[in-house]
Amino acid sequence: MTDLEVVSRLPQDERMLLMPLVRTTPTFWRWAALMAATTLWGAFAYAEQLRRGLGVTGLNTPEYWGIYIICFVFFIGISHAGTLISAILRVAKAEWRRSITRSAEFITVLVIGFGAVQPILDLGRPDRVLNVVLHAQPFSPLLWDVLSIGLYFTASSIYLYVPMIPDLARIRDLGLRPRWLYWFMAIGYRDTPEARAALERIIAVLAVAVIPIAVSVHTVIGWIFALTLRPMWHSAIFGPYFVVGAIFSGIAALIIAMAILRRVYRLEAYLKDVHFNHMGLLLLVMAVLWFYFTFAENLTVWYGGEKAELATLYSKLTGDFAFPFWLMVACCFVVPFALMARRATRNVSGTTAASVAVVVGMWLERFNIVVPTSLHPHVEITAAHYLPSWVELSIMAGTLSGFVLVYMVATKFFPIVSIWEIQEGREKSVEEVKERVAAYLPDHVPAVQT
Amino acid sequence: MARWGMVIDLDRCNGCQACEVACRSENNLAVGGPQAASENRTISWMRVQTELQGEWPDVRARFVPQPCMHCDRPPCTLVCPVEATSIDPEGIVNQIYARCIGCRYCANACPYTVKYFNWRRPSYPESVLPGLNPDVSLRPVGVVEKCTFCNHRLQTARDAARAEKRPLREGEYVPACAESCPTGAIVFGDLDDPGQRVARLSRDPRAFRLEEGLGTQPKVYYLAEQD
C-alpha cells in the first residue's frame, strides 16, 4: 500500500489533515519553484553585497539603517503570530483555537530565523559577528536583543514541537515516509492517558512561560530605538507600542496563512467562518489599540514642540513621508476598522483583505519609524536622502519568499492542523465546556424558613 | 590626569576648511570623490558646517566646524554591542577598527552625526599614497571611524616628554585641525588645567556646546559670535 492509500482509508480528521503529507499538486511545485527562484535571487544579491561591501545599498550618512532593519523589526513582529497568540488562546481556554494553533506556531519558528538574520545582513563586517559573544558589552540593547531572540526561538521551537508529539507518533505508527524522521521525532511516545496527561501539563507550563518571553522580544527591539537620543525614537512608549504592533501584524499574517491553507488544502471544514470571525475581532481590537498608541505618541511629540522632534513629525504629517505615513494610517486603522467592525465583512474574504492591508501597513510603520528619524538628526545635515537599491529590495523579496518556501515545505511534512487536539475537542471539550459554563452559574441556595 | 578638550571661536572661523584638509591628510581619510559626495558618503572627521540664518536680504552665514565632540557621557559607547568604541581615562572617545562589526548603532546614537561608516573599501589616488601617515592605521571596509583628537600625536608628544623626564607642556599635543587653522580659531589642551588657554576659554561667557540639553557633556566648546 502506498502512503496515499493508507491515508485515504483513515477516518475523516486524519484523512483530511494528513492528506497534504502524501499528495502534492503541480500547483504546489510551481509556487515552490517561484519561491525558490526568488530566494536564490535574494541570495545572489547578498553575495554581491558581500563582495562589494554595503556600498551597494542606498544607505548613507545619516541614513545608517534602512530596509534591513525595517525588515528585522517587521519579520520579528510577524513571529509574534504564533507562539504568543496560540499561548494566549490556550491559557484563556478558547476552544476555537484547536484548528489554528499549529499553523500559528509554525509561522513563529520559521519566520524568526529570517527576521534574526536581517541585522547580520546589515553588518558591515558579518565575518566578525562572533565578536558579539567574544567581546559582549552588556549595556548594549543589541546584546539584549540577541539574548531575547535566542531565548524566544528556543522556547517557541519547544512550544511547537511538544504539542506535535502525539501527531508525530500517530504518523510513525501509520508508517508514512520518511519513516526515520517520524520515528526520530516521535521520541518513542505512546499515546496512553498518563502520557497524554503529562504532555498537557508540559504544554500548560510552556504556554505560560512563552508569553513573557514573546513580550520581551519586541520590547527590546523597541528599546534599540528608544534608548538613543534621536528625535521620535527616544520615547518610553516604544516598548509596549512595538509589542502591540507585533501582535497586530502577527494576527494579520496568521489570518492570511489560514485563508491560504484553507483554500489549497481544502480545509473549509476545519478553518471555518467562525474562526475568521473570531480572529477578525482580535484584529479589530488590535487596530483600535494601534490607533490609540500611534495617536498618543504623535500628540505628545506635537504638543511638546521640541525643534528636532517637530521637524521629524512634520516630515511625516505633511512632508516627504506624508504618503507612507497616511497610507500606513489607512492600512493599519481605516481599512481593518471599517471591515472588521461589521459582522457582514468579518468573513473569510473580509478578514483576509483587512489582514493584507495590516501587513502592508505594519511594514510601512517600521519604515516610518526608521527612515524619517534617521534623516532628521539633532545637528542638521545638508541634503539627506535615502533610496533603497536593488540589492536591498532583492534581499527583502528573497527573505519573504524564503519564509513562504519553508512554510510550504513544513506543511508537507507535518500536519498543519493539530489532529489530536481536534479529536480531543470532539471527545472531551464539548462536555468540559458544558460543565465549565454550569460552574459559572449561581449555586443553589436553599430557601430560608421564616 | 588630563581631560583633553577643544574651544572653537566662531568669530574667528572664516570657513576656509583648512582644518578639514589637514585632518584628511593627517588621518589618512579615504578620498571618496564626487561619487561619495553625491551619495552622502563622504568621510570627513572634521566638518565645517555652514549655517544660514534669516531670509534674503537679511542673511547671515556662520561656519561651525564639527569634529567628534568627545562627550564625557558619550551615547555612542554605551550602545556598542562589542565595546569597539569607548572613552579612555583622558576623555578621548576611541574606535577599535579591528573589532567593530559595522552595525552602525553608535553612528545612530550619536546626536552630532560625526561617526562615519566605510560604505566602500577606502581608496586613495596614486598621488596621495606616498603621503599617507604611517602613525595612523588605515580602515578596512565596513567599519565605523571618527575623529580621535589625533591621539597618535599625544603618544608621540608624551614619549618625547618622557625621554626628557619632564611633564607634557601646553601646546606639545595639538590635533592637526588646531595646528592648521590660519586664524587660530581652534584652541586645544587640557580642560582641567586652569593655567591653559583652552580651560580659560571654555569658561568664557561666550562659551557654549552643541545640544547641551541632551546631557552628553561634549568636550568641544564654541565661542558664540559677537555682534
Image: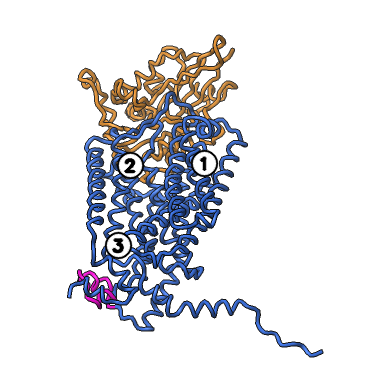
Chain colours: A blue, B orange
Helix, strand or loop for the magenta stretch, by majority? helix
Residue at 22%, 42% (x, y): give it: A44
Q: Which residue is mark 3?
A: A411
Q: Is residue A179 magenta?
A: yes
Judged left or right of residue B152, residue A240 is right
Q: In this view of the protein, which residue sits in the foreground, A81 or A33?
A: A33
Q: In this view of the protein, which residue sits in the foreground, A262 or B196?
A: A262
Q: Which residue is mark 2?
A: A122
- Pointers 2 and 1 within a single chain: yes
Q: Is residue A408 magenta?
A: no
Q: Amino acid at mark 1?
A: His
User: What is the secondary structure assignment of the residue under circle 1?
Assistant: loop
Dot label at residue A234: 1
Q: Amino acid at mark 2?
A: Asp
Q: Amino acid at mark 3?
A: Thr
Quick one: label 2 or label 1, which is nearer the N terminus? 2
Q: Is residue A148 visible?
A: no
- Pointers 3 and 1 within a single chain: yes
User: What is the secondary structure assignment of the residue under circle 2?
Assistant: loop
Quadrant of the rendered image containing residue B149 = top left
User: What is the secondary structure assignment of the residue under circle 3?
Assistant: helix
The answer for how far apart the CA atoms under marks 3 and 2 are is: 31 Å
Q: Which residues are magenta?
A: A170-188
Residue reaching furthest to the top: B57
The answer for how far apart the CA atoms under marks 2 and 1 are is: 22 Å
Q: Eyeballing the image, is A85 above or below A433?
A: above
| Residue B112 percent location from the top left of the image | 46, 30
